[in-house]
Amino acid sequence: MSGASDLRIASWFGLLGAALLFVQGIVDLLLGVISLAVKHPGPAFGVFDQGVILVVVGIIVAFFAAVGRLRGEGRSVVAGVVLIVLALVGWIALGFGSGILALLGSVLIVVSGVVYLLAGR
């Protein structure tokens, strides 16, 4: 495959992973609001905080997935490294295991990062 098609595939994987993280974040935000509305404030704030983190990380991932494609083959290595680091930090520190969407999204982000790294070689 050509370098341009590799970048396109990596971009789509990254954007799909970001969308899944974003959707999981919105679901967590809604669950936090609903839990708070029915007078369960303890678990509500944890879920709400996790939703905010997932939405922000999803936006960051979408940005780097788009930048990696626009900058060409030479700069896709940086986007690949950032995407892999974000996915690993998410697995280890942020706990993306909150839902199946976040887990699938982080796997797609790792795949996107690896394809960006291979396209930039």
Image (tube, rainbow, N blue to C red):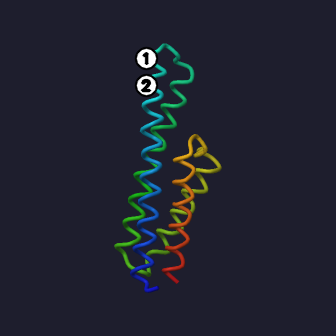
x%, y% of residue 64? 42, 63
Q: Amino acid at mark 2?
A: Val
Assess whether mark 2 and mark 1 are in contact (beta carbons under 8 angstroms): yes
| Residue sitting nearer the eye, 63 or 23 | 23
- For label 1, the SS is helix
| Residue sitting nearer the eye, 111 or 76 | 111
Q: CA distance from mark 1 to mark 2?
A: 6 Å
Q: Which residue is mark 2?
A: 33
Give the residue drawn at x 43%, y 44%. 23
Q: Amino acid at mark 1?
A: Ala
- Asked if 5 appears above or below 90 in the picture, the reply is below
Query: Among all residues in the image, which is located at the extreme right?
Result: 92
x%, y% of residue 98? 58, 40
- Asked if 81 appears above or below 31 in the picture, the reply is below
Q: How many marks?
A: 2
The label number, if any, that marks residue 102 in the structure image: none
Query: Among all residues in the image, which is located at the extreme bottom?
Result: 2
Give the residue drawn at x 49%, y 21%. 35
x%, y% of residue 16? 43, 58
